[in-house]
């Protein structure tokens, strides 16, 4: 078979297009960033026109770099920032409001209200999720309740809801298809992951009309074909789709129960394959659908740290300590330790396993001798410490240790961070040849749907590890580091009365 696969990775700060050979080798990559909008403290929004422009631009650039014609594209895979909430008019296709981003905290009070009313058990049992503003359901409710006329238009069937994947398929297909996939549906607070259907009772709790919701499909099938997309011919199959973290789990070939990966992007996201039976977390994690292929659904446990690479961006954009994110490693290497400085990167609250949206970032242990290098190193260590908390909770929930951890995402290229992560976990860290495993996972799913890959083993055969990081730190050193971290987290939490 001749041709190539196109993967669209629509992320929180930019959109990436990858052109891949039919063997899964990356031929070209292009990324275009787009603005973030912060209308109020704790509010984060995206302009859909700006996202669409970034997607189209990255596609054209990647095709040009690869020297290929879009008419030779065998299929398109989509992966996306999850939970980000979009509402658009079915007739015009126009968004009725900016997208509310997964990092947005405006519905924190509503989540507390639902918890106080005793609703969290209902939502957790059916969706595997906690009541947190991170997730889509309360964002959608906020739009319907706070933007004039939207509730009535929604009840009349004139509006469509979707996460970014759903909106993107709608745009790529020229407005012909309103679908999502099981992995993204499982992140909305509206989807029963056991019965695998939208839940009427949960929708009623959040005042969401069922007419808003997309059809839920598997992660590997032909959903639609391109129509009227700049830079692409009409008729290309749109054939694979999964939320970014589930796509990364798939791209890391974590196909066996107990396999785990961590993606270091804007946030840090740890997922473990738990097989065809989902595990209800008792230690602050989420249960999610990893993927559905054919009639088989695979589940995962997930721990989410909201701020990882975004903390480095804050050093760059907020403090001006570095001019590019890549400089953080060289700055951190100027010192041998943090000098006991600890940075808790709770810049958007604390995610799993704490789930404290009112927690605030904390830099602890500063002295007159502290420098920018100490803060840079503490920032990297803070990212790794958050993952330790997630791994500990996952071990307790799954009743099995993580023996090796596969890593990906832009920050996984930071050797200092990866070595410290191996030291703090006491396990081997495996970094693949390509850390673009989110986009690779989407391409693999599309390739399976159009016959490029004949099964999971063909994907496993293509996977390569670039470097492994072995733990070097003594247990006493590890205990000391973790003790300082946990003391700092306790101080950052909202129940300490600081915020």
Image (spheres, rainbow, N blue to C red):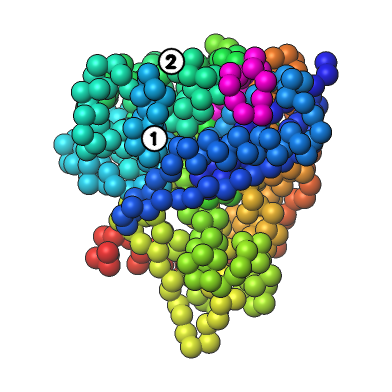
Q: Secondary structure at mark 1?
A: strand
Residue 349: x %, y % from top left: 37, 55
Residue 422: x %, y % from top left: 65, 56
The residues tagged by marks 1 and 2 sit, at their Cα atoms, a distance apart of 16 Å
Tag count: 2
User: What type of secondary structure mainly makes up the magenta span?
Assistant: loop
**Residue 192 in view (yes/no):** no
Residue 229 within the magenta-colored segment of the rendering: yes
Label 1 belongs to which residue? Answer: 85
Residue 381: x %, y % from top left: 56, 64
Disc 1 crowd, CA 10 A, few/some/many (<14, 14-19, 20+): many
In this view, 141 is above or below 75: below
Label 2 belongs to which residue? Answer: 215
In this view, 431 is above or below 169: below
**In this rendering, would 346 be left or right of 298?**
left
Residue 366: x %, y % from top left: 46, 80
**In this rendering, would 44 be left or right of 265?**
left
User: Residue 186 sits in which quadrant?
Assistant: top left
């Amino acid at each position: 078979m001749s041709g190539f696969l196109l993967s669209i990775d629509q992320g929180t700060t930019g959109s990436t297009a990858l052109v891949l050979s039919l063997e899964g080798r990356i031929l070209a990559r292009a990324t275009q960033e787009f603005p973030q909008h912060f209308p109020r403290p704790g509010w984060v929004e995206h302009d859909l026109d700006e996202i669409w422009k970034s997607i189209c631009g990255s596609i054209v650039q990647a095709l040009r770099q690869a020297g290929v014609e879009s008419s030779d594209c065998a299929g398109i895979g989509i992966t996306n920032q999850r939970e980000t909430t979009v509402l658009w008019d079915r007739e015009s296709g126009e968004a009725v409001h900016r997208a509310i981003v997964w990092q947005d905290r405006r519905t924190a009070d509503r989540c507390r209200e639902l918890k106080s009313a005793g609703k969290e058990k209902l939502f957790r049992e059916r969706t595997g999720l906690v009541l947190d503003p991170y997730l889509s359901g309360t964002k959608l409710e906020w739009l319907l309740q706070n933007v004039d006329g939207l509730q009535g238009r929604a009840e009349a069937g004139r509006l469509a809801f979707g996460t970014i994947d759903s909106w993107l398929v709608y745009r790529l297909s020229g407005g012909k298809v309103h679908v999502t996939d099981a992995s993204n549906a499982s992140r909305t607070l509206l989807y029963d992951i056991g019965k695998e259907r939208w839940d009427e009772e949960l929708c009623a709790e959040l005042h969401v009309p069922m007419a808003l919701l997309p059809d839920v499909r598997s992660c590997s099938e032909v959903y639609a074909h391109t129509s009227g997309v700049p830079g692409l011919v009409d008729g290309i199959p749109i054939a694979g789709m999964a939320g970014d973290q589930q796509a990364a789990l798939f791209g890391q070939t974590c196909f066996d129960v107990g396999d785990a990966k961590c993606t270091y992007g804007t946030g840090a996201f740890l997922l473990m394959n738990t097989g065809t039976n989902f595990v209800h977390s008792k230690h602050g994690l989420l249960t999610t659908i990893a993927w559905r292929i054919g009639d088989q659904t695979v589940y995962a446990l997930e721990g989410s740290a909201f701020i990882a690479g975004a903390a480095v961006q804050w050093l760059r954009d907020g403090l001006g300590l570095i001019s590019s994110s890549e400089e953080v490693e060289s700055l951190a290497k100027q010192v041998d330790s943090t000098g006991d400085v600890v940075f808790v990167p709770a810049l958007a609250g604390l995610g799993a396993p704490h789930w404290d949206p009112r927690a605030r970032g904390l830099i602890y242990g500063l002295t007159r001798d502290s420098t920018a290098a100490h803060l840079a190193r503490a920032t990297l260590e803070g990212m790794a410490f958050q993952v330790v908390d997630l791994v500990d909770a996952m071990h307790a929930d799954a009743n099995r240790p993580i023996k090796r951890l596969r890593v990906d995402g832009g920050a996984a290229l930071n050797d200092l961070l990866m070595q410290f992560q191996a030291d703090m976990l006491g396990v081997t860290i495996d970094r693949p040849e390509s850390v673009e495993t989110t986009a690779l996972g989407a391409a693999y799913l599309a390739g399976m749907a159009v016959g490029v890959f004949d099964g999971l083993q063909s994907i496993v055969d293509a996977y390569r590890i670039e470097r492994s990081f072995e733990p070097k730190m003594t247990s006493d050193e590890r205990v000391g580091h973790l003790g300082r971290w946990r003391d700092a987290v306790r101080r950052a939490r909202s129940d300490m009365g600081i915020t």
